[in-house]
Image (spheres, grey):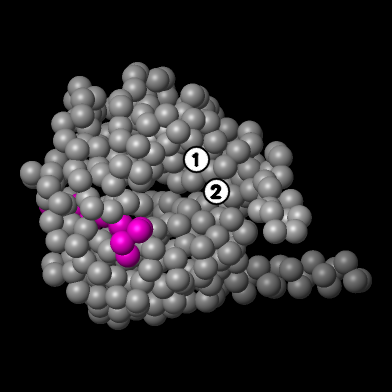
Amino acid sequence: MKQVLTALFLFSASATMAQSGTYHVTRTFSVPGDGKWDYIALNPVTGHLYAAHGTVVNILDKKTGQAVGIIDHTTGVHGVAFAEKFKKGYTTNGKLNTATVFDIQTNKVLGEVKTGEKPDAILFDPFSQKIIICNANSASLTVVDPANDQVVATVALGGSPETAVTDGKGNLYVNLEDKSEVVKVDARTFTAGPHWALGKGEAPTGLAIDVATHRLFSGCDNKLLVVLNTDNGKVVTSLPIGDGCDGVAFDAGTHTIFASNGEGTLSVIEEINADKYVSQKPTPTRKGARTLVADPQTHHVYLPVADFLPAKGSAKAEIAAGTFKILEVGK
C-alpha cells in the first residue's frame, strides 16, 4: 500500500507541475569527456546541440540526447555559431586565438581563422552576413566573411566584450564586462558607437534582445537583469536574478526571458510589454549551470553543467570526472 501511495503522490505531483505550466528539468543528457564548459548552441539545420567543452565541442541529438559527434582540437573553446547560408559553422578557441570553420551538415573541419586574443562569444549577423567574434583580451570584435573565411574588420570597443547580439537591421550590441556598459556597433561600417551605462548593473555577462519591442536584456554579476531601450540606451527597468549569471536568452514565441545562474537556478521573467516584466518562480537547475540556449521551436532551454567534488578549504571545487551533462528545461 505504501508503494502505491508513493506512486500516486509522484504522479499527482507531476500532473500538478504540468498543469501549472511550471518550468522544470525534464531530461538530463550524459555527455562524454571532461573539462570546463562554456556556451551551448543549436544548429539551425540539423537541430543538434553543440556544447563547448574543454578542447572539443560535443554534439548531441536534442531529441534523444545521444552523442552524434565532436569537433576536435578546439582548445579553450567558448562558443559556436552558424552561417546557414554559407553551410558553415564556427567555434571560438580561447587558448589558440583562432576560430575553427566546419561544415554545418557533416561537422568536417574546413579551416581556421586567426582572431584577436581570447576569442569568446560568437554570432552570425544576418544583416551584414558576417561572423562576429568577441575578443575578451583584445577589447575588440573580429569580423569574418563566411564567403571566404577572411577577416574583413577589427572593431576596437574600449572595453572587454563578454557577448553580443544583433537586431538584424544593421546594429550590434555588446556587453562590456569590465566597464559595466553596452556599446552599440554599426554593422554597416563596423565602427563602435555610443556606450550606454547599465545603471545599477555591474559586470554584464549574458545578453539577449527582443527586436520587436526594441529591448536589450543584460544579465549582470550583481544579481540584476537590466532592460535597455535599443533606440536610446536608456534603462527601462532592473529585475532580480540569481547569482553567477553567464547567459541570457529571449524566447520570442513565449515572450519569456531566461537567465542561467551558476548558483543553480534559472531565472524566468515574463515580458508583458516593452515596459512591464513579471518574474516567475526560479527553476532549480544544478550548481554551475551558468550558460544556456533557448530552442525557438520547442521552447525548451538547455544548460551544460557537471558535478563538483567537495571543496577543500579555500580551494575551488574541482569538477568530478565523467559527470558532464546537459539539462533540458521545459514545462
Q: Amino acid at mark 2?
A: Pro
Which residue is label 1 attached to? 51
Q: State the residue at coordinates (66%, 53%).
A: 316
- Does 174 appear in magenta? yes
Q: State the residue at coordinates (30%, 57%).
A: 176
The residue carrying pointer 2 sits among few (fewer than 14), some (14 to 19) or many (20 or more) residues within 10 Å by Cα, namely: many
Q: Amino acid at mark 1?
A: Ala
Pick whichever of labels 2 and 1 is earlier in the sequence: 1
Q: Quadrant of residue 44?
A: top left
In the rendered image, the residue lying farthest to the left is 189
Name the spot of residue 177 as percent of width and height, x first: 35, 58
Whether residue 124 is visible to the viewer of this picture, yes or no, is no
Left or right, residue 201 beside residue 323: left
Q: Quadrant of the N terminus?
A: bottom right
Name the spot of residue 100 as percent of width and height, x first: 37, 27
Could you say whether the residue bearing mark 2 is in a helix, strand or loop? strand
Q: State the residue at coordinates (63%, 43%).
A: 324
Up-down relation of residue 99 to residue 186 (above or below): above
The residue carrying pointer 1 sits among few (fewer than 14), some (14 to 19) or many (20 or more) residues within 10 Å by Cα, namely: many
Which residue is label 2 attached to? 304
